Image: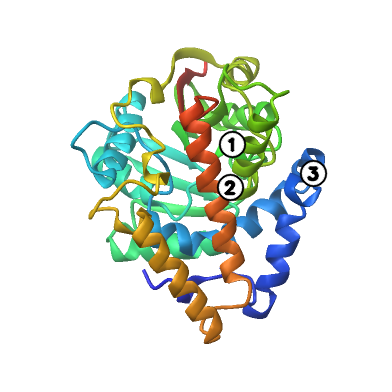
Amino acid sequence: MDLASGLGGTISKDQVKSAVEQYEKYHVFCRGDEEARKSNYSDMVNKYYDLATSFYEYGWGESFHFAHRWKGESLRESIKRHEHFVALHLGLKPGMKVLDVGCGIGGPLREITRFSGASVTALNNNEYQISRGKELNKLHGLGQSCEFVEADFMKMPFPDSTFDAIYAIEATCHAPDVLEAYKEIYRVLKPGQYFAAYEWCVTDHFDPTNPIHQKIKAEIELGNGLPDIRSTRQCLQAAIDAGFEVIWEEDRAESSSVPWYLPMDKGQFSLSSFRLTAIGRLFTRTLVKTLEYLKLAPEGTERVLCILETAGEGLLEGGKKGIFTAMYFFVVRKPL
């Protein structure tokens, strides 16, 4: 991945700095508020992914999510297993029509398509991520078995009861109203079929009156384009209220041998994930400064990197304190 080439996404290079400033104003650190983030969620999330996607792909690869991880397992291996886990719980197989809600640049859909043989439709409201995903599909020879649709998952352009299975991996956390998001997923899922999701949530250990907890939550929201972070209980209840039957739910962080937040820890060293280490991050910061100084990267690029570093700090502290999880998983069924 050439970091410089995709910086800013579809935003004009001379407008990147302005876009960063507009994005920051949605958040608590810049006196933004939750209602403004929710009412302008589409603009906020689009700006975030236009600004952040190249950094994600450069540092993380094609799949923008955390993973349940065993000792001795690399981050890349755990990410693939994480995606296979979803496919297995949905019972995916050739001939099934599947929806990936909030697909990013399509890393999970490509892995799940190859693993299961199912046909996956990828939904995303970010133009740059869609175009990048299509490029990568062609590169991997998956142009026929996967398709991308540019649309908002709060109002999907599909008829009722279209899909044999649906999944969302760390995506519906961007919804301004998770109940309405789940209702829309319920609508387009066929009766008797399953929806699986990984959600970003605060846990029962989160204390909304604790200023340290509040700060961590705000850092995660700023650094990841989130209107709000819901609790695990709120997410599960929203799925029930949308009409689903709960098959299984678990915070998979509790059974992960290696903490999900370990890649955020600068004290760790890994050759396989070098760009996430302290040395790798120092190299990236120096590279970004140099590219911006030489005008090979747009003005404002370093500020985007700072936002992402804030996210990493919040995720690490939230995970260590047990007040936040990126691993809340559930499988629900739409009744016949």
| Label 1 vs 3, first from the N-terminus | 3
Secondary structure of residue under mark 2: helix
Label 1 – label 3 distance at C-alpha: 15 Å
Colour scheme employed for the rendering of this structure: rainbow
- Disc 1, disc 2: CB below 8 Å? yes
Label 3 – label 2 distance at C-alpha: 17 Å
Question: Percent x, y for residue 148?
Answer: 48, 54
How many marks the image carries: the answer is: 3
Q: Residue at x 40, y 40 (%)?
A: 66
Front residue of 44 and 183: 44
Which residue is the site of mark 2?
Answer: 224
**Which mark, by number, is residue 102?**
none
Which residue is the site of mark 1?
Answer: 173
Which residue is the site of mark 3?
Answer: 39
| Label 1 vs 2, first from the N-terminus | 1
Q: Is residue 133 visible?
A: yes
- Disc 1, disc 3: CB below 8 Å? no
- At label 3, counting other C-alpha atoms closer than 10 Å, the crowd grade (few under 14, some 14-19, many 20 or more) is few
- Dot 1 amino acid type: Cys
Compared with residue 171, is residue 71 higher up or lower down, i.e. above or below? above
Secondary structure of residue under mark 1: helix
- Dot 3 amino acid type: Ser
* Residue 245 falls left or right of residue 269: right
Instruction: Please tell me in which quadrant of the rendered image residue 228 appears.
Output: top right
